Amino acid sequence: MKTPPESFLLFKEELKKVQLEKVRLKNQYESKLAEMNQELCRLKEQIQSQQAMLRTTLEYAENLENSLGKFKEELNTTQAHRNNGVY
């Protein structure tokens, strides 16, 4: 059996290097992708928390507004009763 030509051996060695580089890049890409997905999940949780806080704040503001409206009505009613008093 003949020995393969030197150019074939060089080509085979270069091909192996390229394949190893491809595997390394693939692993690096997958690692970066997993890292970005974790960051995305963390940001998503933060956004959901902020939305919940805003929702709670709006509900609280609505309750305060309703309470203020009732208080104003009571105040007007009380003043009207005082004006109708006997003096």
Image (tube, grey):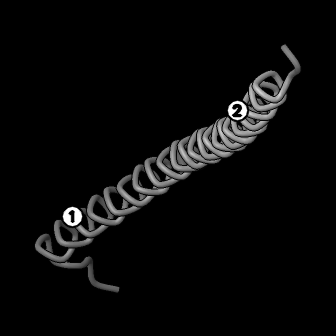
- The crowd level at tag 1 (other Cα within 10 Å; few <14, some 14-19, many 20+) is few
Left or right relative to 56: residue 22: left
Foreground tag (1 vs 2) = 2
Which residue is found at the position 34% from the left and 63% from the top? 22
Which residue is found at the position 47% from the left and 54% from the top? 33
Q: Amino acid at mark 2?
A: Lys
- Note whether 24 is above or below 57 in the view shown: below
**Residue 44 pos. (x, y %):** 58, 49
Q: Quadrant of the C terminus?
A: top right
Quickly name the residue at label 1: 14
Left or right relative to 11: residue 20: right
Labels 1 & 2 near each other (Cβ < 8 A): no
Tell me how far mark 1 sits from mark 2, CA to CA. 85 Å
- The crowd level at tag 2 (other Cα within 10 Å; few <14, some 14-19, many 20+) is few
Residue 86's image quarter?
top right
Left or right relative to 81: residue 65: left
Quickly name the residue at label 2: 72
Which residue is found at the position 65% from the left and 36% from the top? 61
Which residue is found at the position 74% from the left and 41% from the top? 66
**Residue 30 pos. (x, y %):** 49, 56
Q: Nearer the viewer, residue 37 or 71?
A: 71
Of the two numbered discs 1 and 2 on the same chain, state the one appearing first in sequence. Answer: 1
Q: Nearer the viewer, residue 56 or 33?
A: 56
Q: Quadrant of the N terminus?
A: bottom left
Q: Nearer the viewer, residue 70 or 55?
A: 70
Q: Amino acid at mark 1?
A: Glu
- Note whether 70 is above or below 17 in the view shown: above
**Residue 35 pos. (x, y %):** 51, 44
Farthest bottom residue in view: 1
**Residue 63 pos. (x, y %):** 75, 39
